[in-house]
Amino acid sequence: MEKTIDEKKQGEQLVMDIQHYPEQGVQHRKDGKKLYIESYGCQMNFSDSEIVASILAGEGFNTTQQLEEADLVLINTCSIREKAEQTVRKRLEKFNAVKRINPAMKVGVLGCMAERLKSKFLEEEKIVDMVVGPDAYKDLPNLVQEIDEGRNAVNVILSKEETYGDVSPVRLNSNGVTAFVSITRGCDNMCTFCVVPFTRGRERSRDPQSILEEVGQLWEKGYREITLLGQNVDSYLWYGGGLKKDFENASGIQKATAVSFAGLLSMTAEAYPKMRIRFSTSNPQDMTLDVIRTMAEYPNICKYIHLPVQSGSDRILRAMNRLHTREEYFRLIDNIREIIPDCAISHDMIAGFPTETEADHQDTLSLMEYVKYDFGFMFAYSERPGTLAARKMEDDVPEEVKKRRLTEIINLQQQHGLFRTQQHLGKTEEVLIEGPSRKSDAHWMGRNTQNTVVVFPKEHYNIGDFVNVKITDCTAATLIGEATGLSDKSLF
Ligand code: SAH
Ligand code: F3S
């Protein structure tokens, strides 16, 4: 079975958090137009959908979960693997069926597939009225007007500056407790398998002041945990705006006052000492000791690092253009374990990259054995058009070999997951309650600092409480326990 990030949220109908954002409550307006929006793929896409909903709320749209009653249907798409694109195409077929009953309904494609396929979408998928790339959402009011007037609309221009820093996002399908805050957009890493640098453009960082303001607003609304988001957060660098790659041309003053990721982390942790802070994703080649030390220094920065490695073989790492070796990765892991002994670490892994041999695959398994990751997101290689790997390398590992290697990787991760959850048995850990457990209405679900899911009887506790939970049992991915009282963070 292939694991994806936020699997349970894929394709969920997204609705606004009116409870915490009553000012967004345009659903009370009789003339409110109805927006139906679905998101696929990474956390950044879910975060972008909140920006889109916010921009359209300004145009009088409110969200609906009823596809049939929608005036505008938007699908925020993912191109990372072929399967992700197929899922979207299936949804478009469904929208087409609804459109036949309700021809006034308009359909727009957002995100990475929109960027990758551009106007081809209008030709291939006749039901699509609007195509909008990830840097063009501020143009939505104009684009929506165009389709209202009966024309097709496309904007897939990638930007050097756009970070949506000035858009205060509404929250969609929010638990009212945890939220994403995006800090960088785009990616310059050019991993040879990856379509993201093509669909999301060059890397740029968001003004730290606007990040702090957004975190402050979330705190005021009762949110207690934020995740700073970017394709490669450790590469964050604010020097007054502009592309990361243009930093070398910045002025002396700009360079001297630049804010790094470690700087942003400590600024945020200090400004909101009771807010839990997470971040994702870290690229091993850009993660500094400074960041690890900053994590150790602030109790409100969660002890969890998502540190994708993709392969354990030096030869494959080189072919993937991952700019570190296996040994360098081990040294980074050793440093993390030394500076933050209880830090959880997770990974992304790709099975069956072109030319991968059985020996390379064994290197991957032995790397996993060394780290014993807490979690993992594991994928079979999927060739993406336009990437360097697609242009220069043959997708030569047979499908059944990819599948078998992937299964071996997943099985090993399952063992390591169990090993890691077992280490929590008998301990009492601080958990932030996010909502009811999916399996039992009598239980709360939350996470400890390591990001492991913890389930325990509800008793008199509430969503948003920080609770100490004694861990009594576990599976490979979940801790089970009992609350012993509110933690210090709740008592203020
Ligand atoms: N830096 C990004 C990575 C996004 S892609 C982040 O924020 O997480 C997420 C993961 O998808 C990658 O780490 C990689 O493991 C996987 N992936 C990317 N391209 C892929 C491809 N062509 N085939 C299979 N898996 C891929
Ligand atoms: Fe993709 Fe590598 Fe960037 S996986 S998102 S090119 S860090």
Image (spheres, rainbow, N blue to C red):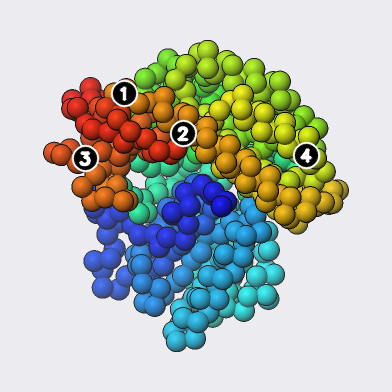
Q: What's the residue at 40%, 38% (across, down)?
A: 475
| Numbered circle sitting on residue 389 | none
The reply to whether residue 319 is in sight is: yes
Image height of 129 relative to 162, above or below: below
Q: Are marks 3 and 1 in contact (CB under 8 Å)?
A: no
Q: Is mark 2 within 8 Å of ligand 1?
A: no
Can you identify the residue that label 2 sits on? 418
Q: Position of residue 481 (x, y in %)?
A: 27, 33
Q: Position of residue 35 (x, y in %)?
A: 40, 67
* Mark closer to the observer (2, 3): 2
- Looking at the image, the residue that sits furthest to the bottom is 101
Quarter of the image for residue 350 reads top right
Using the numbered discs, state the Cα–Cα distance from disc 3 to disc 1 in whole angstroms: 17 Å
Can you identify the residue that label 4 sits on? 358
- Looking at the image, the residue that sits furthest to the top is 338
Quick one: SS at disc 2?
helix
